[in-house]
Amino acid sequence: MGQLRHYLMNRNLLRVTLYVGLIVAAFAILLPLLWAVSTSFKSYPDVLAHPYQLLPRSLHPANYVEAFKTIPFLTYFLNTVKVSFFTCLGTLITSAMAAYAFARLRFPGRDALFLIYLSTLMIPRQVVLIPNFIIMKTLHLLDTHWSLILTGIFTAYGTFLLRQFFLTIPNELEEAAIIDGYGYARRFTQIILPLSQPALVTLFIITLLNIWNEFLFALVFINSDAKRTLTLGLAILRGDFDVQWNLVMAATLLSILPLVLIFLAAQRFFIEGIALSGVKG
Amino acid sequence: MEWAMIRSLTARERKDASAAAIFLLPNLVGFLVFMVGPTIGSIAISFSSWSLLNAPTFAGLQNYSDLLKDSVFWQTLGNTAYYVFVKVPLNMFLSLLLASFLNKEIHGRNALRTIFFLPMVASSVSVALIWQPLLDPTSGMVNKLLSFIHLGPYPWILSPNWAMPSVIMVATWKELGYFMVIFLAGLQGISSTYYEAAEIDGANAVQSFWHITVPLISPTTFFVLITSIIGSFQIFDLTTVLTNGGPANATNTLVMYVYQAGFKFFRMGYASAVAYALFVIILAFTLIQNQLSKRWVHY
């Protein structure tokens, strides 16, 4: 009896430790974000106040309007939306088509070509940065959004991810469709694509995360202020010595907000997608 | 009859091949132009001396021999290695620990998972902007909080010795949830009967973690190890915005050096050589890990 009580006490102690550990960890993750939110609503004197103010003494939502005026936030934002939209669209369409060929069609040299696709997965993006800079210069695409979109679309990752998924769709479905007289285009768009929704959403989310947050290629390719993306526009704020952190935090939070909202709305796809690409990929 | 079947098969194959050409074309053209071509071109450029202003001249192995003598290259390599070999194990340990906590039947599990994953959707640029004022030695919140438990003040990103640990801390804060999610998926594949059997045998939680969770999750651990080593060697955004490579080059990384060589000093050949060195290092680590994995990964 005493032993059982001892055992149960240990168990409860463990549970309490577990909860305390998790709550401390969650607090450590959330605090910087909450601080950013709090700062974004502070007046400028409040930001510098001594003693330190965790919460704003008065709320200044006007900081968000001010952020739009002090930096061309709207331009950066729309540029990022544009680059992200076309990169995601291009990636989804071209990868799905190529993946269909690799997964479902027989053609000479298929395995060799797929091996080339696979081997580029290992190559860090920085290796292709300089040659792509020269290509963009030659094509007169430097300082255009196309330079970011074109280098963003053609990674082997999408083709690889979708090919793996297409392979899991039973062949019989397509064989039946062939008997019904479906051509390649109809089989692809009416059978394969609808059944691949989870993989397509995963690829969309991963591509969106990468391109929305991309920094290095934008830094190298983009020159004029009117073409800057959010990461680039925000990064140069750091250079100012009399940074108004309340405005910077307002702009930073606004730049994260769309992805946070998409994440909260489609959390299942984020988590399952990352688990899918992680465990099986 | 048989002949007709073979003929129809080859006819199908021929049709397949021409359809494949159309399906492949859009991706293949872009892939060759923006990925395969540049990968090969990058080797060629690394054997040249090229400032972009005049035509490239053949330089043989000059860039690579310069590289071996370049103290900044070795320093950036050292900094990058410091970052990789401290952050990766730290991050893996913490994310596995969190994942095994969250794998239990507890209240608020989904809410906690959401919180841990949240920083992952933010760009490294915005993460750096959020953390920079927090790490300010005099006015930053981190030192203010630590002073409550009589620690500090620490110089964080303003001191060469503290800058890299600060970068590692911020990177861990951002990436923890990502690896936690992958570990969590792996943990869900472990049958609870192992843990029940261990409990009957009188194993405590720590023993269960080391003797059941760690070996059974090893394929996931291997995947996380490889991807996070590859990703961490490429650190650029965070150090560029948080510390700009400083102070005194303490957080200048290999990819930052590729950028500096190429677009500050306009030495395209040299920058390509640095980029290739990075690739070879990543490749070597991946191959070594792959060999070593045979000893500790249990499929």
Image: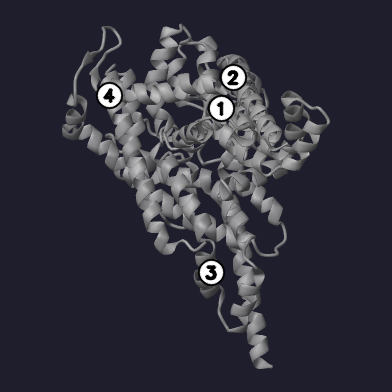
Chain for disc number 4: B
Query: Which chain is disc 3 placed on?
Result: B
Neighbor class of circle 2 (other Cα within 10 Å; few <14, some 14-19, many 20+) is: many
Q: Nearer the viewer, mark 4 or mark 3?
A: 4
Which label was assigned to residue A83? 2
Circle 2 sits in a helix, a strand or a loop, which is it? helix
Q: Name the residue carrying label 3.
A: B209
As drawn, is A217 to the left or to the right of A212? left
Q: Residue at x 67, y 87 (%)?
A: A5
Distance CA(mark 3)–CA(mark 2): 45 Å
- Residue B46 appears in the rendering: yes
The amino acid type of the residue labelled 1 equals Ile
Q: Amino acid at mark 3?
A: Phe
Mark 4 or 3, nearer chain start = 4
Question: Contact (CB < 8 A) between labels 4 and 3?
Answer: no
**Which residue corresponds to mark 1?**
A211
Q: Which residue is mark 4?
A: B46
Q: Is disc 1 in the same subunit as disc 3?
A: no
Disc 3 crowd rating (10 Å Cα; few below 14, some 14-19, many 20+) is some
Q: Are marks 1 and 2 in contact (CB under 8 Å)?
A: yes
* Chain ID, mark 1: A
Mark 4 residue element:
helix
Q: Are marks 1 and 4 on the same chain?
A: no
User: Are tags 1 and 2 found on a single chain?
Assistant: yes
> What amino acid type is highlighted by mark number 2?
Val
**B140 left or right, relative to B86:** right
Across and down, in percent, residue B254 comes to 32, 34
